[in-house]
Amino acid sequence: MAGYLIKDTTREERQKIVEESLGNISANCDGCMAGLAEMYEDYINGIREIRDINMEFNVRFVKGGMDREDSRSCPMG
């Protein structure tokens, strides 16, 4: 695999990248891992680059763009 960009990977490779990065996504005791996995569906499907998804998440988190009810330890749950 040449890199992480959509143009350099297959869907299967992108799915493997996400799974390996997140660890065991089926062990979602608090629902957090499932939310993180869903967050990267656009990358896996070749719609948005992983860096764009991460930047959007970081901007919302840093600027406090989440609703108060969503401000748990894991905002993806």
Image (tube, rainbow, N blue to C red):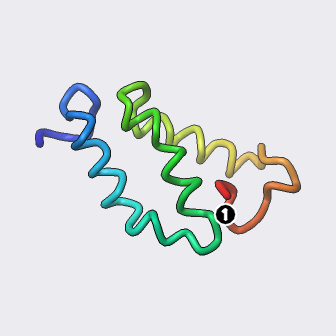
Residue at the far front in the pictured view: 26
Front-most of residues 52 and 31: 31
Element assignment for label 1? loop
Q: Quadrant of the C terminus?
A: bottom right
Report crowding for label 1: few under 14, some 14 to 19, many 20 or more residues within 10 A (C-alpha).
Answer: few
Front-most of residues 11 and 6: 11
Front-most of residues 2 and 47: 47
Residue at the far right in the pictured view: 68
Please state if 27 lies on the left or on the right of 13 as rendered.
right
Please state if 35 lies on the left or on the right of 3 as rendered.
right
User: Residue 19 in the image: x percent, y percent?
Assistant: 35, 57
Residue corresponding to mark 1: 74
User: Residue 70 in the image: x percent, y percent?
Assistant: 80, 55
Determine whether 39 is above or below 19 in the image: above
> At x 79% / y 59%, what residue is drawn?
71
Q: Quadrant of the N terminus?
A: top left
Please state if 35 lies on the left or on the right of 47 as rendered.
right
Q: State the count of labels.
A: 1
Residue at the far left in the pictured view: 1
> At x 74% / y 46%, what residue is drawn?
63
Please state if 62 lies on the left or on the right of 34 as rendered.
right
User: Residue 76 in the image: x percent, y percent?
Assistant: 65, 54
* Residue type for callout 1: Cys
> At x 77% / y 49%, what residue is drawn?
64
User: Residue 11 in the image: x percent, y percent?
Assistant: 27, 35
> At x 43% / y 28%, what residue is drawn?
48
